[in-house]
Image (cartoon, helix red, strand yellow):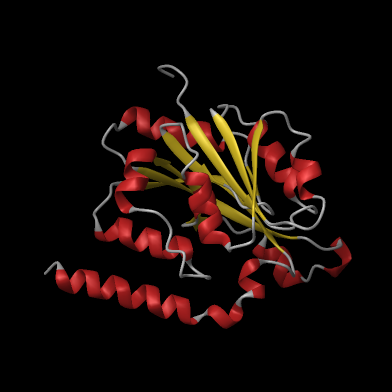
Amino acid sequence: MNGAPKISVIIPVYNGEKFISEAIQSVVNQTLKPFEIIIVDDGSTDSSSKIINAFPEVSYYFKPNTGLASTLNFGLQKVKGDYIAFLDADDYWSIDKLEKQFILFETDSDLDLVFGCHQRFYSKPSNEITAEERLDMTRVLPGYFKAALLVKKKAFFKVGLFDETIVMGDFLDWYSRAVDMNLRMKMISDVVLFRRIHEDNMSTRNKSQILDYVKIMKASMDRRRSNK
């Protein structure tokens, strides 16, 4: 590689003591080391801070609980690198996630962002995993998630920060804006993200916010109409 890239990793956390250590370790162990690891604690009341502060590689910030989008935006204001990556506190990366994605930026300087594939796994005892869930864990799927993304900082801020009025679908909203702005993006076939399925997933806790998706789709359609 032509010099080490400056990649800033942002991990938001809220009461993530069960899984945050595994998430951080997957970033620390990357074959392409990140320039900085920014963890923003959205008012956790468990032992998350103690676990996080055991990692000397991390820059830790605590703030009052205001939700995911504002927590991500807080972290984005701290970024000093030229590329940005995100990871949820209950998921983890493949060991070469950043390296495999950054290679594409070296071969195509006009590229704005790179996604990778993901696999799901179930966080419960093996004897409780159903046959359908075991089959699900074998699937390799395109990862249109922020945790499967590597993006140039200038491209990210060209699109703008996350919409703090959205509880569910903060990244879907950002991605739809990026598509509408014709940002150049690619998807690699490698698995870069392992998504944990468990009872405390945000998507499970916030089913009542499904109307946010309707709001996001309407905003995208409105933008496209106005650009015609």
- Work out which quarter of the rendered image holds the C terminus and state it: bottom left
Q: Is 203 positioned to the left or the right of 79 in the image?
A: right
Give the residue furthest to the front: 64
Q: Residue at x 17, y 74 (%)?
A: 225
**Residue 53: % across, % down:** 75, 37
Q: Is 214 positioned to the left or the right of 29 in the image?
A: left
Q: Nearer the viewer, residue 96 or 208?
A: 208
Q: Is 18 positioned to the left or the right of 189 in the image?
A: right
**Residue 82: % across, % down:** 41, 32
Q: Which quadrant holds residue 214? A: bottom left
Q: Residue at x 50, y 42 (%)?
A: 85
Q: Nearer the viewer, residue 219 or 196?
A: 219
**Residue 33: % across, % down:** 58, 27
Give the residue furthest to the left: 228
Q: Residue at x 76, y 45 (%)?
A: 49
Q: Is residue 189 visible?
A: no
How many dots with numbers?
Answer: 0
**Residue 176: % across, % down:** 34, 63
- Work out which quarter of the rendered image holds the N terminus and state it: top left
Q: Is residue 154 above or below residue 171?
A: above
Q: Is residue 206 visible?
A: yes
Q: Residue at x 26, y 36 (%)?
A: 110
Q: Which quadrant holds residue 52? A: top right
